[in-house]
Image: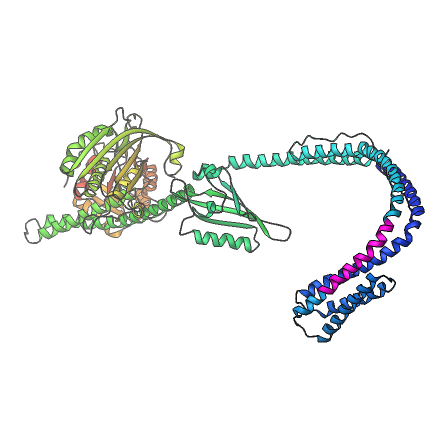
Amino acid sequence: MKLRRISRVFIFFTLVCLVLLSIQGGLTWRQVTSGLAEIDSLLEVRQQATRVAAAIDYISLLRYDPLIIEGVHQDVMQISQSLNTFSRLEAQVAQQHIREIAFICDQLRAIDIPGYEVDRFVASQLLLHINGLNESLELLLAIPYENLMQQLLGTMASFVLGVVVFACMSLFGFVLIFRRIGLPIRVIQESVHEFAKGNRQTRINLDGQDELAQLAASFNYMAAKLALNEQELASSEERFRLLARATVDAIWDWDLTSDRIWWSEGLDKTFGYNLKEMDQSLETLTGPVHPEDVTEMKASLQEAILSGKEGWRMEYRYRKQSGDYAHIENNAFVIHDASGQAVRVIGGMTDLSEQVQLEEQLRQSQRLESIGQLTGGIAHDFNNLLTVILGNAELLEDELHSNDELRPLAEMIGKAAQRGAGLTQHLLAYARRQVLKPDLLDVNRMVRDMSGLLKRSLGEQVEIEINLKPDLWPVLADRTQLESAILNLCINARDAMPTGGSLTIETENVQLDDDYTLHYQDLRPGEYVRLAISDSGIGIEADCLSKVFEPFFTTKEQGKGTGLGLSMVFGFIKQSNGHINIYSEPGEGTVVRLYLPRAEEVAEEEAISSAMQGDGVLFRKVLVVEDDELVRGHAAELLESLGYQVLSAENGTSALELISQDDTIDLLFTDIIMPGGMNGRELADQALLIRPELKILFTSGYTEHAVLQQGRLEPGIQMLSKPYRRQDLVEKLTTLTGGTEKIS
């Protein structure tokens, strides 16, 4: 049976009981009609009197209101009319009080002054007469009430009988409703309560087809749907949580309505902050921002939120737990509600410190490379000039050997040219254009051999400590240049300790992995020998560290340094396929680490080309190829002074024509760097195709890859570096002729 049918049955029986009670009440009510009419009339009068009393109470508070006065006057007039039907003495007394009240009201109505304060005496008279009216009405009501109570006793007896019948019907209805409605509702209530506590598997089991059963079925469907949605939501949240854990970014979610912020575990992994110790305030996002960036960061983020933008991005510095600042990129999206109001901001912070460092190193490398190319070009042209100056100075010295006044001037010119040559040699070392003669070296033995020289060079105020790891790998490097680099670094360390201190030289084998070499573009993973030189000196300021390898940069006082020492060491190490880094803190000292690649035992070099080695044949005719007219003329004059026939050419094309036309040319003396699309090495290769027996001697202000192999001269290559002296040229010619060449 459905609930509506049950309700109809219960309502039907209830109506039957009510009809029976109504009939019984109607039969007995006639007996008390007259008494009730009188009581009703008196009750109405008393009700009106009650309203009048309330109004007078208001007036008694000294508040004058014309509308209330008017209402009181009308009510007392109606009470007077109602009491005219009663002839008892009590009614006459009541009429007397009414007349007094009406009289006072007439007096007050005549005033009509806003804000008028009622006189206390008038208010007390009103209260006195209304109380007298109420007492008279009570006396009038007492008599009909006594008659009415007697009549009602009989009526109550009949009514009790009806109530008993109605109670029985109600009990029957209650039992029926409890079984059909109460118990199912209780089951529904308990199930809903259990579901609200978090038990998503709760279901309502009700049989039947009534409304409650349909409600239970709807609840079960909703519960199953909600459980599925929660499962999907939990799965989505789990994916987000795992994604947040997997990424190195610090993901944050700022709820603008509650002003609370949530962080992913990336904040701990990337920046070192313990999430358990942090609150959820916005301070965790803005507090660690660098003081120089925080104002701009806050303004930019606030502008993105208020302007309705969807995205926001900014790079700034963010303090880690360690106290160091990381260069970060913060990308965020602003989420708006249906009305367009921003409600959430979700973003992620990426640590760009490594990328910024790599970019800075790239810029530094490019800057150093550009400086290297510039210095190499300058050294090339300068060496051409020095070649002419030095050669002519030697000629003057020979011509003026008996002139004691002028010969010192020629010697001074030669010495100045040699000093200039030394300067260009430093520049070439930095530019990685110097000619190296690498040998297989034991760095430990070399350091021990230098210990005496270092002690004499550094003085007694510097305490030297040498820690050499055994079984050090061999390296392939130019001994002279490496010794010069070590001595240079030690002298720099001495100068950084003006009042004395300690200097430590350490060697060891190291394996540089991908993680380390990733920070340096020109460094490859592998096995290296590390030579570290550290001191306890004054250290170097951070803003100077990035410039220490640049030529002519120095932190020493004016006149106490050329600024070429570290640049020369830098160029030599780079040209040797090694690596150099420097770490320093003001007041704590400096450590310079040199990394040279491990060298395997090398076999004997291949046989030297016959075109590059001496065979005892004397030269008669030499072809000089040089694009610089002054150098070309000087070289020709120098060779002619040695007794050679000399031909000259300014480029490779002209030289090849002469070689093709003249088969008496014994030696090709050519510059390496020349304009016209053909360098000296290419000229030599083509010349040997025409004249395989032709001897080759290269010259250059600096070397290039055309004659270099892994930073050193190719086997058998003979090269004369500019600027050169007459004796240097004679020695090279002697080497090419197998030691038979003589100076004319």
* Residue for point 12% across, 50% down: 412
Q: Residue at x 83, y 34 (%)?
A: 171
Towards the viewer: 434 or 670:
434
Q: Quadrant of the N terminus?
A: top right
Whether residue 675 appears in magenta in the rendering, the answer is: no
Give the residue furthest to the top: 471
Where residue 136 sits: x, y (%)? 79, 60
Q: Residue at x 50, y 37 (%)?
A: 247
Observer-nearest of 485 and 379: 485
Q: Position of residue 517 (x, y in %)?
A: 38, 35
Residue 734 on image: x %, y %:
19, 36
Q: Which residues are magenta?
A: 127-148
Examine the structure image and report whether residue 134 is included in the region drawn in magenta: yes
Identify the coloring: rainbow
Corner quadrant of residue 102: bottom right
The residue under the point 41% across, 49% down is 290
* Residue 701 seen in this snapshot: no
Against 629, residue 524 (above or below) is above
Q: Nearer the viewer, residue 539 or 154?
A: 154
Q: Quadrant of residue 106?
A: bottom right
Q: Quadrant of the C terminus?
A: top left
| Left or right: 425 in relation to 351 | left
Q: Is residue 270 visible?
A: yes
380 left or right, relative to 167: left
Left or right of 267 on screen, residue 679: left
Magenta: predominant secondary structure element? helix
Question: Could you tell me residue 636's position as x and y percent?
Answer: 22, 47
